Amino acid sequence: MWRFAAVSQEASVPRTRHAVRDRLLAQGMAGERYQELVDDLLLIVSELVSNAVTHAAVLSPEVVCELAITSDRVRVSVVDGHPYRPKAQQNDPARPGGRGLLLVKSITLQAGGECDVERTEEGGKVIWASLPLPTRATAGPGADPDDDPDC
């Protein structure tokens, strides 16, 4: 498990994204075979860290991004100290924001992965997404993102 801690501020979003990208590349996830997976993971990291910075900074001066790579999956998690469990909002074009978790859920399910929100022992939360590593064969289409209420 690789961990990257950052201060809960907007500048931490690109810093964390770059750190995750560098770690994925160091783990051999370079080239065309991994491009879509890396792009998806970086977008997920951006959204989750941005949400943590925006909504949890008052109670969580630090956010932690964790990356775990197994033989068939990559799991990215963002941990903060705020107890609120967010839910993916419905897409409402009249609202200026609120689509981050919906986007994470959609990307994750389209890639054949899963995502969830869990409590930490300290009373905060961890939001995670787990995506399958690409195989030589092309996978079929993902599930409908509206089937899962949380992410």
Image: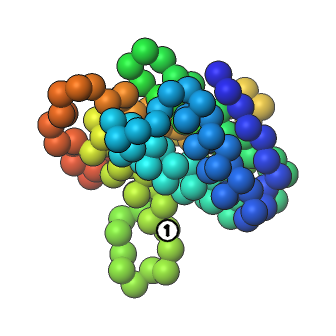
- The picture quadrant where one finds residue 121 is top right
Residue at x 22%, y 42% (from the top left corner): 142
Asked if residue 53 lies left or right of residue 29, the reply is: right
Task: Depth check: give the residue in front, 135 or 49.
Answer: 135
Residue 40 appears in view: yes
Q: What element carries label 1?
A: loop
Q: Give the answer, above or below, for where 90 lies relative to 124.
A: below
Most distant residue in the bottom direction: 94
- The picture quadrant where one finds residue 111 is top left
Q: What residue type is labelled 1?
A: Gly
Most distant residue in the top direction: 71
Q: How crowded is mark 1: few (under 14 residues within 10 Å), some or many (20 or more)?
A: some
Asked if residue 137 lies left or right of residue 89, the reply is: left
Residue at x 66%, y 58% (from the top left corner): 14
Residue 115 appears in view: no
Q: Give the answer, above or below, for where 3 lies relative to 45.
A: above
Location of residue 110 in the rendering, given as x and y in whole percent from the top left corner = 27, 45
Location of residue 73 in the rendering, given as x and y in whole percent from the top left corner = 42, 24
Residue at x 40%, y 84% (from the top left corner): 94
Location of residue 100 in the rendering, given as x and y in whole percent from the top left corner = 48, 61
Task: Depth check: give the residue in front, 28 or 38.
Answer: 28
Q: Name the residue under label 1.
A: 98
Most distant residue in the front direction: 31
Location of residue 18 in the rendering, given as x and y in whole percent from the top left corner = 64, 49
Q: Give the answer, above or below, for where 134 lies relative to 103.
A: above
Residue at x 44%, y 49% (from the top left corner): 39
- The picture quadrant where one finds residue 114 is top left
